[in-house]
Image: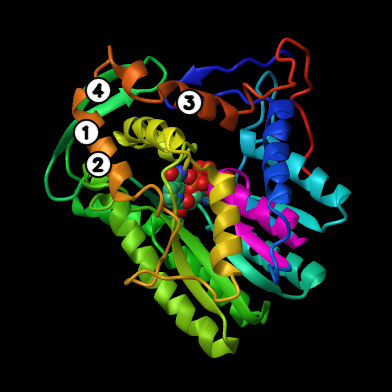
Amino acid sequence: MIIKPKVRGFVCVTAHPAGCAAHVQEWITHVKSMGPIKNGPRKVLVIGSSTGYGLASRVTAAFGSGAATLGVFFERPSEEGRTATPGWYNTIAFTRAAREAGLYASNINGDAFSDEIKAQALETIRRDLGQVDLVIYSLASPRRTMPKTGAVHKSVLKPVGASYTNKTVDTDKGIVSSVTIEPANEQEIADTVAVMGGEDWELWMNALAGAKLLAPGAESVAYSYIGPEVTWAIYKNGTIGLAKNDLERASRNIDSMLKLAGGGRAFISVNKALVTQASSAIPVVPLYISILYKIMKANGTHEGCIEQMQRLFATHIYAPAGPRFDEAGRVRIDDLEMKPDVQAAVASIWPGVTTESLSALTDIAGYRTEFLKLFGFGLPGIDYDAEVEPHVLML
Ligand code: NAD
């Protein structure tokens, strides 16, 4: 099969296995180039490990610290005439590379919200690893099926309290337009908190602790975003922001539990806005990211998922002095994004962006390049006109 990108709105419905493998290899190369992380993790569970920040965490743990990793994710294999999702190919590429390097890597593909997948993960840890010393929780999901009742909650990306109007960009067509989003109702707020809040993280951590699968001093980290005022109505103060507040609530509970259990800790890392499958679905945010990339690339502070996660591990989680927390107890690796000069530059560019000025004022080209890379397209050294086998078995 010859595989080309097929972009439909904010998703690409094809993925290139060799391109995804090359992308994962770029990340591995970066982590190795940064040198070993001293006293890093040894045995790691990553929930949401196949793309974005979760995959970058897994690559960092394995190739920066020689850790054994168990990855949990929800990806679709190839079917007749259809490629697999990128996370499927990423995971195979990661697993091959890890095993070639002599590292344990095991995978569970299924719904992390379910009791069955939690039980499978616990059993795998008991059998193969004994205990884990780090748990990364990096799920980004549009829905959650409650294991006990079968009820399905769907998350929405909406403002709370009042409607919100701002500019947004169709990243595929390059059209800037005004979008108005009506506020969420109480049910939509509750549903979004159920999906993207902290309850499931707590269920995972309590299950691991109950089964004595957490090593003394075990740590757990989940990811959040705050961002600039221009996105607050749709992010920080919107339904997703309320879910992230609940994640912070869960973080405090898990932190107390881990401290009592053996001097461990849990915390939230606030990460930078980056092109991922999850962020491309949020209105307004891709336009902000396109402007942000332009500014951060120009001043030499741009980072991708892998640079962010390598920095999180090396300079916070496993730093000799430990993580540095903000006033709310969170780690801030969004520090470079949130610098006042960067945000002032975004704010000055924002009003002038139109369809006509999009290419000149923003890094929409860089956004598109990064977006296609998520699906394995545009990687150097890959012949995209060559036949490639889309059907690859999970390892
Ligand atoms: P992503 O879409 O790249 O990755 C999501 C991961 O979750 C994938 O591995 C996917 O397979 C897995 N997943 C989704 N539903 C699942 C399910 N039911 N069961 C098992 N696995 C499931 O997303 P991302 O952008 O890397 O987001 C990860 C976390 O980082 C989220 O909490 C997000 O809010 C946060 N974050 C993202 C950004 C950003 O700009 N992308 C910034 C800061 C924080």
- In the picture of the structure, the residue carrying the numbered disc 1 is 348
Q: Nearer the viewer, mark 1 or mark 3?
A: 1
Which quadrant of the figure contains the C terminus? top right
Q: Nearer the viewer, mark 3 or mark 2?
A: 2
| Distance from Cα at disc 2 to Cα at disc 1 | 6 Å
Under mark 2, the amino acid is Ala
Quadrant in the picture for residue 247: bottom left
Label 2 or label 4, whichever lies nearer to me, is 2
Residue 150 percent across, percent down from the top left:
46, 56
Q: Which mark sits nearer the N-terminus, 3 or 4?
A: 4
**Which label lies toward us, 4 or 1?**
1
Q: Residue at x 62, y 48 (%)?
A: 55
- The x, y position of residue 118, in whole percent, is 62, 64
Say which of 210 and 180 sits in front: 180
Q: Secondary structure at mark 1?
A: helix
Residue occupying the point 78% across, 47% down: 95
**Mark 1 near mark 3, Cβ–Cβ under 8 Å?**
no
Taking the spot 78% from the left edge, 55% from the top edge, the residue there is: 105
Which circle's residue, 4 or 1, is located before the other in the chain? 1
Disc 2 and disc 1 in contact, CB within 8 angstroms: yes
Of pointers 3 and 2, the one earlier in the residue sequence: 2
Residue that label 4 marks? 353
- Classify 332 as above or below 231: below
Local crowd size for mark 4, using a 10 Å CA cut-off: few (<14), some (14–19), many (≥20): many
Residue beneath disc 2: 344
* Residue 18 part of the magenta segment: no
Q: Nearer the viewer, residue 122 or 366?
A: 366
Residue 165 shows up from this direction: yes
Q: Position of residue 175 (x, y in %)?
A: 31, 16
- Image quadrant assignment for residue 333: bottom left
The span shown in magenta is: 43-68
- Quadrant containing the N terminus is top right
